[in-house]
Image (spheres, rainbow, N blue to C red):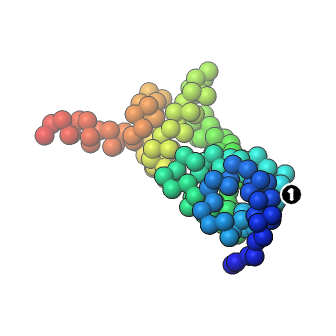
Amino acid sequence: MSYSLSDQRKNTMLERLGDAAQLIDDKRFLPFYRSIQIKLEREDKAAEWLHMIEIALTKENPSRYFAKMCKMVKDGTYKFVEKVKEVQADLRLYVHDKLVKYQFGKFQKYWVRKAQEFINVNGQAGFVDLLEYAERTGINQKQMATALKNCKSPRQYYQENVLGSAK
């Protein structure tokens, strides 16, 4: 993929790309990056372009990371922020539904946040394992709260803290 660029065209693209220009190592690919920017603007996702730049600047190799994200947009595999928020909201509802039976009452929102921290540490499979374990053993509200607070299943906590200290 190569493009012919005159100096005037190159300068115009650099000007229109704005902050993203500092993330582009090879100026021959300016039309590729500009096409991504135009595509996002047409889809009313211009803020996503700025978000991609902000994220790339935090990474160790920002130009490579930015190029990879642009390629993902071109291929249609990039997950936009609103889609991630939608999935997160669905997960929050799922967690809320699963924790209702423990009757946390007015503290339900707090324990849903704790459950999401548990999921961040152990993954959703870890949370499902915790729920299955709770179903099998019939743990109560206090034990579930402790498991969520420690970010460990009761079985794992028992092995590490009770059996581990006995050695």
Residue at figure coordinates x 80%, y 59% from the top left: 12
| Residue 31 versus residue 56 in the image, above or below | below
For the C terminus, give its image quadrant. top left
Residue at figure coordinates x 68%, y 55% from the top left: 21
Number of numbered tags placed on the structure image? 1
The outermost residue toward the left is: 167
Which residue in the protein does label 1 denote? 42
Location of residue 137 in the rendering, given as x and y in whole percent from the top left corner: 41, 42
Residue at figure coordinates x 66%, y 66% from the top left: 27
Q: Crowdedness of circle 1 by 10 Å Cα count: few (<14), some, many (20+)?
A: few
Return the residue nearer the eye: 2 or 12.
Answer: 12
User: In the visual, does 68 lie left or right of 137?
Assistant: right
- Which quadrant of the structure image shows residue 144? top left
Return the residue nearer the eye: 43 or 20.
Answer: 20
Return the residue nearer the eye: 7 or 113.
Answer: 7
Residue at figure coordinates x 20%, y 40% from the top left: 164
Q: Amino acid at mark 1?
A: Arg
Residue 33 visible in this rendered orientation of the protein: yes
- Which quadrant of the structure image shows residue 113? top right
Location of residue 100 in the rendering, given as x and y in whole percent from the top left corner: 60, 34
User: In the visual, does 60 lie left or right of 10?
Assistant: left
| Residue 93 versus residue 105 in the image, above or below | below
The outermost residue toward the top is: 106
User: In the visual, does 33 lie left or right of 128?
Assistant: right
User: In the visual, does 95 lie left or right of 20?
Assistant: left
Location of residue 156 in the rendering, given as x and y in whole percent from the top left corner: 33, 43
> For the residue labelled by badge 1, is the local secondary structure a helix, a strand or a loop?
helix
Location of residue 114 in the rendering, given as x and y in whole percent from the top left corner: 51, 33
Residue 135 visible in this rendered orientation of the protein: no
| Residue 135 versus residue 74 in the image, above or below | above
For the N terminus, give its image quadrant. bottom right
